[in-house]
Image (cartoon, rainbow, N blue to C red):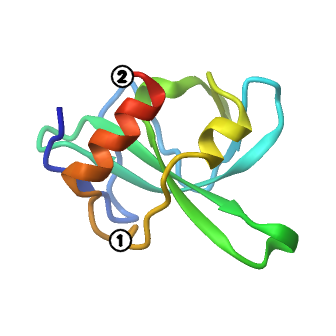
Amino acid sequence: MPVNLIRLERHQHPNPPHHELRQKRVLDLEGRLVGQIENLYVDDDGQLQYVDVVTSGFLGLRTNHHLVPVEVIAEEGAGSVTLEVDQQEVESTPTYATPHSGPDEELQDTTREHYGY
């Protein structure tokens, strides 16, 4: 069910149990580097709903923003976040071009369906 999402500004942080995740490396369930978290999206109550995982294309020439639901995070470490899915699953989600605004309802629905939530 889509919710109104707010992108946290750099000085804002998500409510516990989540910590500051921006700039952390994102690893898949096999320990492979997927990308890095750039933005955090919370609901009206400040609860973390999605992270924006930035991946690089061939030779790092193109970056893509992938919306990942918080439920896919398996572990939050000191310098990285591990997901419950593999790199291919993240990279096969729809990308979005406006990461500085909250994802629209259609993208939220598509993303949740992709991950089975």
Indicate the quadrant where residue 73 lies. Answer: top right
> In which quadrant is the C terminus drawn?
top left
Q: Which residue is mark 2?
A: 117
Check contact, mark 2 vs mark 1: CB within 8 A. no
Which element type, helix, strand or loop, lies under badge 2?
Answer: loop
Q: Amino acid at mark 2?
A: Tyr
Q: Quadrant of residue 47?
A: top left
Write the residue at 82% across / 25% down: 30
| Alpha-carbon span between mark 2 and mark 1 | 24 Å
State whether residue 27 appears in this view: no
Q: Position of residue 102 (x, y in %)?
A: 27, 60
Q: Is residue 80 left or right of 43 when viewed as pictured? A: right
Is residue 50 among the parts visible in the rendering? yes
Q: Quadrant of the N terminus?
A: top left
- Closest to the camera, between mark 2 and mark 1, is 2
Estimate the x, y position of residue 15 in percent, counting from the top left: 29, 35
Specify the label residue 100 is tagged with. 1
> Label 1's element?
loop
